[in-house]
Image (tube, rainbow, N blue to C red):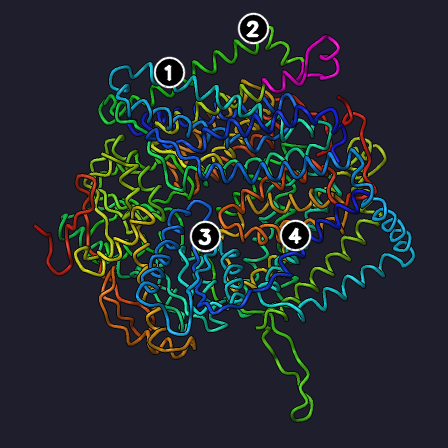
Amino acid sequence: MKKRVLSMMVMGLILVPFLFGPVSAKTLRIGSMGPLTGPYAADGNDIKNGVLAAIKVIEDEGGIPGYDTIQLFPQDTACDPKQAVASANKLINLEVVGVIGAYCSSSTIPASATLAEEDIIVITPASTHQDVTDRGLPYVFRMCGRDDAQAPAAVKFMKEALGAKTIFILDDKTTYSQGLADGVAKASEAMGIEIVGRDHVNQGDKDFSAVLTMAKTKGADIFYMSLQNHSTGSIMAIQARRMGLKAKIVSNDAMFHPNFMKVAKQAAEGIYVTYGYTDKTTDAYKKYEKIFTAKYGEIGAYATYAYDGAIALLKSIKAAGSTDPERVKAEMMKLDYDGASKHVKFEKNGDSGSSYIAFQVKNGDYVPYWTPAQGVLK
Amino acid sequence: MIHEFKKVWKPYTLGLLWVLGLLWPLLGIHPDGTLSFERTLIVWLYLLVVSFVCLILYLMNKSGHLELMKNPLSAAWSKGAVAAKVPPVWGWFLVGLMLAMLFPLFTGRYHQDVAINVLIYVCLGLGLNVVVGLAGMLDLGYIAFYGVGAYTYALFNIHYGIPFWVCLPVSGALALVVACIVGYPTLRMRGDYLAIVTLGFGEIIRIILNNWMTLTNGPNGIMGINRPGIFFPSFADGFSWEHLWLKKLWLLYYVALGLAVVTILCVHRLNFSRVGRAWESIREDETAAELMGVNTFIYKLLAYAMGGMFAGFAGAFFAARMKFVSPESFTFLESAMVLCMVVLGGMGSIPGIILGAAALIVLPELFREFELYRMLAFGSVMVLMMLFRPEGLLPAKRLGTRSEEREG
Amino acid sequence: MDYFIQQLINGITLGGIYALIALGYTMVYGVIQLINFAHGEFFAAGGYVGVILLSYFAGRGLMETHPWICLGMSFMLTMGYCAFLAMGVEKVAYLPLRNQSRLAALLSALGVSIFLSNALMLTQGVFDKPYPGELFNGGWEFGLVTISYLQVMIVTMTIVLLVSLNILVFKTKMGMAMRATAQDKTMSALVAIGSNRIISLTFAIGAGLAAAAGIMVGLYYGSVRYDMGFVPGIKAFSAAVLGGIGNITGAMLGGLIIGMVEIFGAGYISGQYKDVFAFIILIAVLYFKPTGIMGVNVDDTRV
């Protein structure tokens, strides 16, 4: 008998979530998506905190007319396409007006397709894969740069500033990192850099000694790491130094994270990273920095983009005076102002332009080293 | 409840305090030597409250305070159970089906989405049930066949535009073939050796999906897969068949429901057929089954292939629903998840597995409100469920006990 | 040749780490036929306790003055801590399921694993924790071959631990009791061996070894993260099965083979398929010798 009672209880427990629908109040609901659990949880939390900082800024400025509060519904995608679609549907049910997210390109692509069915605006702060905006979905925007802009910039940098003749390319087999590595390979061939090796590691690996030994034996000028996550990067940098790898290490935007240096310490010194240029002296950035660091600590790689995405969304809603996606989109296309990370102006397909420059790690800080326009900075 | 509860209650409480006491310092210390106990305290408090509630319930039950509530309940329940015996099993099945049919009328997108997930996992769970529950082979790489099914539909649809309904049997058949290829060399192993080899094959298939760029597009996955379509009779001018894509979620829900119902019926028929009995005899004692003239290898291979086929069907539907497949959906953790559904629900029991699938999909969604704490809660609930009902929520009736499993 | 020797050294290091983790799996399996999925979490917990202790010592400046004492203390305390943690987990999650089907215990182990790794994530944060490891950087250079101090240390530690474990299991009375319990619980109970105590002890020893591996991995790779236990856990489990599950020498051998195959697969063929090579070796060995390299035939107990 007891087991019947128990199974009834379980059934009851299962039915509970179906009883609570969304509660109505005069709040503006926006959503954020990102991996809050799993191996990329660090970046997902950065995105969430960036959006929260933006909400605080807008609310301090008087909020959005017609709404008492702005509420954020952060959803966990765990970097898994299935969970991303589930959280997208959850956000649709919560009747959010816009979504900031997601992180992994492989989550953003299916989730934005789902959100597009209900005409919800998506601004991705971190997914750099071309197909995010190239699918012709009308309400998908992107704050960060594109892979096909980063790869040529990185190769140009290696050729011009570092005088590279040979290159060894390594990626960690994700939608993002492999796409970028392919781009680098293609651009290297076009610019006459010889590819002496191309290899992959799997996500979750910690031991790269075999691959690094190979890279050392091949003796390339440049060791290019295209990785999804900064923690893989820091482990790889440590092992590369210990192995005595002579090549200069160049890496991608995911390594632009304070924790990368915290873990890699000395091993990070001298590593070059390509990342979207952010002028840290602008008023917009200083204002953001003050609010963010006060509450959430150090600024992560994608927090700034998430912040700018949320500001752009909320500004447009304010200007449009409604949450109708068509009108908000029209306002978003009109945006033309200096954000915290860059000058915000959306192109027709939803991209906001890329401004990749190279940084060098010096004394535990990212120092701008090279720009496509000015060459090596003195 | 736990069988020797009285005997283990005291050491159990001690053990719990032991673990929590040990976790406390680990979880609160920062590497720089500073201490912060806030987050640890929250985790700890959650655990304490849950264990306290369990303790109170247990004590009340033991001292008879719950009798007032329990007696009428159990009386009503036994009356209900007698009444439930009156209509045949298929009657209850139809009632359940009716409720499931009406489900989309009262719910929104999110609930339908969760329901579709549940139905997919019901198919997967029932497929794995054939392997683990009926034939008694521990399979830790089951999700690979799901992946094979999903990629079959995705590739055929993308490259040749073959519609879902044609691809569905093809996906199932291909998953079946792969299961036979994998099963042929592995099924001679027994017990945990089989488990690790299936895990290995599952990982190999996933890594191949991830690395074979020209065929599967690697980690980028395959995008733009078509939804299933249906021919709808149209009377606009004369009579013609109009082709409709199933774009609305609730239409997909009905496709999933249909797939689940077919799977349920198939597994039910298999379970109570000559084949099912042969499987169960292998599960109970392989040596004895062989002595009785059951060709164990063929039947084990059949179970493995059947399980693979159901996973292939579910995979094809998964690809159609997501419109996107990538290897990340087919990791070992998914296999473990499906195995959990089977064991949690009750091995070999169809209603049990439906309940198990519903519980394991809905619980993490339910805990979404806890945000970061949801996987923590999920893990502890899994342990608790196993402690309280190790044989599953609704165990199968036909499950023998072997003498060596009862030893001390 | 240099290349081969370098990869050989890499392989031995990785194999040693896998062997240490695999021992825990194999010992627990040998005694109660449970695949302890939470074992990888003890490894991660070991890494975390190690980073806490070492950072504490480094913060007090003790690492410069007495590096070996600090390291020894950290190893001792961490191994002790994880041993006690494993005993606690065993009491809570496995002991009540002793007489139930083995799958129930398996799922309980999976639940514990999810719980522990998420508890670590929630309280220690999602970022990597850096190890204070500058002290042990550097190494010897022989032409193109580099042997870092850490690699030597890991291999030495592994050998010491393995030898002492072998002495413990095969030469002491306690080891005899463990082997007796593994063979027949009822009979060993009749000769006055407390099986619960022995099982607890087995968990403790396994987790202690995993914790040692955790610190070494932390030192070697420079950081620990809350989910670090999962992948090595699976690999070590494969290693344990490859060597013949339940067999201690087999687990060491299996760990070494899996580590070598991975490194040589990555070094000579392709990094992306290195896990495939490891699993193919596993499957091939089990195909020709279905009980693993050194295993004896298991009875066909139901899963």
Three-letter code, disc 1 = Gly
Residue occupying image coordinates x 72% and y 49%: A9
Q: Main secondary structure of the magenta part?
A: helix
Q: Is residue B173 visible to us here?
A: no
Task: Work out how far the residue at label 3 is from the one at label 4, CA to CA, in angstroms.
Answer: 22 Å
Q: Determine if marks 3 and 4 fall on one subunit.
A: no
* B39 sits left or right of B117 in the view: left
Give the residues in magenta.
C181-201
* B327 sits left or right of B49 in the view: left
Comparing C287 with B277, the one in front is: B277
Task: Work out how far the residue at label 2 is from the one at label 1, CA to CA, in angstroms.
Answer: 25 Å
What secondary structure is marked by label 3? Answer: loop
Comparing B373 with A198, the one in front is: B373
Q: Which mark is residue C171?
A: 2
Q: Which residue is mark 4?
A: B124
What secondary structure is marked by label 4? Answer: helix
Q: Determine if marks 1 and 3 fall on one subunit.
A: no
Q: Which residue is mark 3?
A: A79
- Circles 2 and 1: CB atoms closer than 8 Å: no
Task: Work out how far the residue at label 1 is from the one at label 4, CA to CA, in angstroms.
Answer: 50 Å
What secondary structure is marked by label 1? Answer: helix
Q: Determine if marks 2 and 4 fall on one subunit.
A: no
